[in-house]
Image: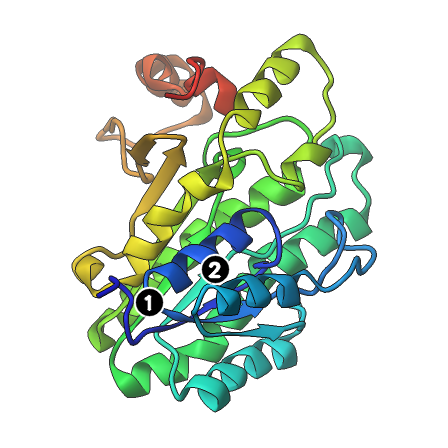
Amino acid sequence: MGILDGKVVLVTGAGRGIGRDFSLAMAKAGAKVVVNDLGSSTDGSDVEGTPAADVVREITEGGGEAVANYGSVANFDHAKDMVSEAIEHFGQLDAVVNNAGILRDRMFHKMSLEEWHAVIDVHLNGSFYVSRAAADIFRERETGAYVHMTSTSGLIGNFGQANYAAAKLGIAALSKSIALDLGRYNVRSNCIAPFAWTRMIGTIPITDEAQKQRIERLKAMTPAKIAPMAVYLCSDVAKEVSGQIFAVRNNEIFLMGQNRPLRSIHRGEGWSPETIAEHAIPAFKPNFYSLDRSQDIWPWDPV
């Protein structure tokens, strides 16, 4: 008996990289899988083949059940079609993995409006569209699980990724809101921040020695290492887990923090700009966050 026996899972961006390994792992755990992939290039500008069909072939040759979907997560009608396809082919939908993504890296002061909108549309809007399309099914059945892909680029920071970072931090907030709003229907929502070498990560420009070393560390981490957490979060074993953010780095799993007050300061007569400068900021300054990037927080090699 697999941990996902009897479940139907929709995985977006599932034709390559992390999404492909998610789909294969879901099927191996007993799930029937809707494998969604537009087949686009890493920047979303061109369609490059039909990788969803290749993954479906792998699953069916291994004795599993899967169906390919070629819709764009950035189109709400396509998102609704993904959910409908799950119902039409398999009779239900139990979990959604919002994995589809593109990169348009650029330093903020050089980023075009098109580069901004393209990444927001796929990552943030796409996660909302697919989640919203599945919400009515989950509410009606009073069960369901969402797994969203966030990133330390948003949770912590990185150079040249304002669009991607904003989308990924927005996804963390979206996930928390879904967990709060749909918890009464036994619907769960969690995030994974993955560390893995993928086709998309391979497009990140190497600008300095530190970035080169970071990329080399990423190359040692395969997408398959992320899949067990996604399978777990889609299963009934995780029924008590919702609203959380996990990072998976090779054989390491981290429970990530979420924004909470660090310190407070009170002045009975109220504040002026001058007293803020003289009193509040010096008191807060020891607790200020530095301008860290992901590689500053995880400087050691993956284990």
Q: Residues within 10 Å of mark 1 (few under 14, many from 20)?
A: some
Quadrant in which residue 37 is drawn: bottom right
Viewer-side residue, 135 vs 90: 90
Residue 217 lies, in percent from the top left, at 53, 20
- Give the CA separation, mark 2 to mark 1: 11 Å
Residue 292 lies, in percent from the top left, at 49, 19
Judged from the image, the secondary structure of the residue bearing numbered disc 1 is loop
Q: Amino acid at mark 2?
A: Ser
Give the residue at x 44% y 77%: 134
Image height of 101 relative to 221, above or below: below
How many badges with numbers are in the image?
A: 2
C-beta proximity under 8 Å, tags 2 and 1 = no
Q: Residue under circle 1?
A: 30
Indicate left or right for 87 with 75 as reference: left
Give the residue at x 67% y 72%: 70
Q: Let me know if residue 136 appears in the view.
A: yes
Indicate left or right for 161 with 292 as reference: right
Residue 180 lies, in percent from the top left, at 28, 64
Viewer-side residue, 49 vs 245: 49
Q: Locate the C terminus by quadrant.
A: top left
The dot on residue 23 is 2
Viewer-side residue, 139 vs 273: 139
Q: Let me know if residue 293 appears in the view.
A: no
Q: Amino acid at mark 1?
A: Gly
Q: Locate the N terminus by quadrant.
A: bottom left
Give the residue at x 46% y 57%: 24
